Amino acid sequence: MTIRLRKYTHPDFTQEQFTSCPNATFLPCPADGVAPEDFHAMSIFPEYFKVDGEWLMAEESRMDCVPVLKDGKIEVVEFRRLKKDELVAVGRTEKCEDGIYVHPNGFGEKQEAADVFAFRSSRSRETAFSIDYDELYEILKYERDHGKIVWVMGPAFAFDYDAREAFSKIINGGYVHALLAGNALATHDLEAAYLTTALGQNIYSQKSAPNGHYNHLETINRVRYHGSIAKFIEEEKIDNGIIYSCEKNHVPYVLGGSIRDDGPLPPVFGDVYEAQDAMRNEVRGATTVICMATMLHSIATGNMTPSYRVLEDGTVRQVYFYCVDIAEFAVNKLSDRGSLSAKGIITNAQDFIVHLAKGLEVHEPEIERMP
């Protein structure tokens, strides 16, 4: 299979709808953290704003934020970061009426002709996802050297020996450039490396260990004793697992805390907005995002990931976004929340990662750009 990176085409600004429309209107924020009335909210798609007769693209976007005019550029800012008197674009239209244009088809996506009535036209647990695996092998091979791959993970992987090993191989192979997760994923993965259990259940036999319900707390306590995960790994001679592989390969990971966390581990962000900022810092350069077995982290990441990325040389390229979960509800929820470009794979996340790791060992990519 050949991955064809679609060429991006900017709108033709010589057309009448662009030349005859007014400039975008920017109004000052009335107070810190407050946008002016009729503010324009960003989408996942490329958006342009007419300023002094020229169309400016918001190069780094995020859904549910607002466009701010600063030093002749459009910056996309969270509401909580707005400052009094900053200039925010106003207008709720998307086809130049207010000097704002949303460009959803810049990559030339074409809908294949299909019958009005057809079976299995949507993606569900009955869908054959073989083509998605083939696509992922090639995407990851390409992105390893030419992009940034961000993984968003729930704790399910830490409960199975094969899944932990598979993802560790993927990290060691260079297919992970950042990891976003919560306290649970890191805790149970480190528990598995330290005590061979996850939530007290043996990762090999799946049998509960005596007093095993203490094991995750013992692990957290020991990490806190050492002061950091890196020191814990060194002092306790940890030599396996997801977090160990991230540390060994200098892969950054962001652990966003929740109200139910135990401990937590030292690097976990207890402030939700600090966690959001840290996650967005990793997502900013992402060209492929894969979310697995975590609905809330997946939706959060989906909301901050646009459908495109502007590279350093000015090239605009598409962003691949996958959501893997055994529950159709979790996959569909991501699209319902506005992440329309996300592709769902409905399967057991542990099986998925084992299958993917095996496939990456034998697949070599063929990459070409669409004309």
Image (cartoon, rainbow, N blue to C red):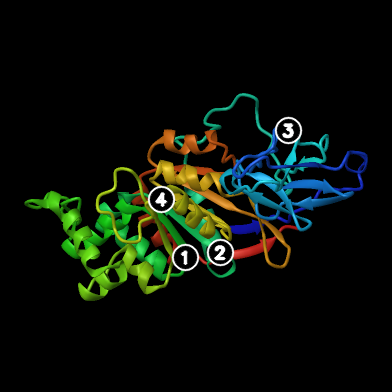
Q: Which residue is drawn at the image coordinates 67% and 40% (left, top)?
A: 30
Q: Amino acid at mark 2?
A: Glu
Q: Cα distance, mark 4 to mark 3?
A: 32 Å
Q: Is residue 163 left or right of residue 92?
A: left
Q: Secondary structure at mark 1?
A: loop
Q: Nearer the viewer, mark 3 or mark 1?
A: 3
Give the secondary structure at mark 3: loop
- Does residue 91 appear to the left or right of 242 in the view shown? right
| Residue beneath disc 2 | 143
Q: Which mark is residue 175?
A: 1
In the picture, the quarter occupied by the N terminus is bottom right
Q: Are marks 4 and 3 in contact (CB under 8 Å)?
A: no
Q: Is residue 219 above or below residue 327?
A: below
Mark sitting earlier along the chain (4/3): 3
Q: Quadrant of residue 365?
A: bottom right
Rounded to the nearest whole Å, what is the CA distance between mark 3 and mark 1? 40 Å
First in sequence, mark 1 or 2: give its number.
Answer: 2
The answer to whether 164 appears left or right of 9 in the picture is left
Amino acid under disc 1: Tyr
Percent position (x, y) of residue 16?
Answer: 93, 40
In the image, farthest residue toward the left:
210
Q: Is 286 displayed left or right of 243 in the figure?
A: right
Name the residue tied to disc 4: 271
Q: Earlier in the sequence, mark 1 or mark 4?
A: 1
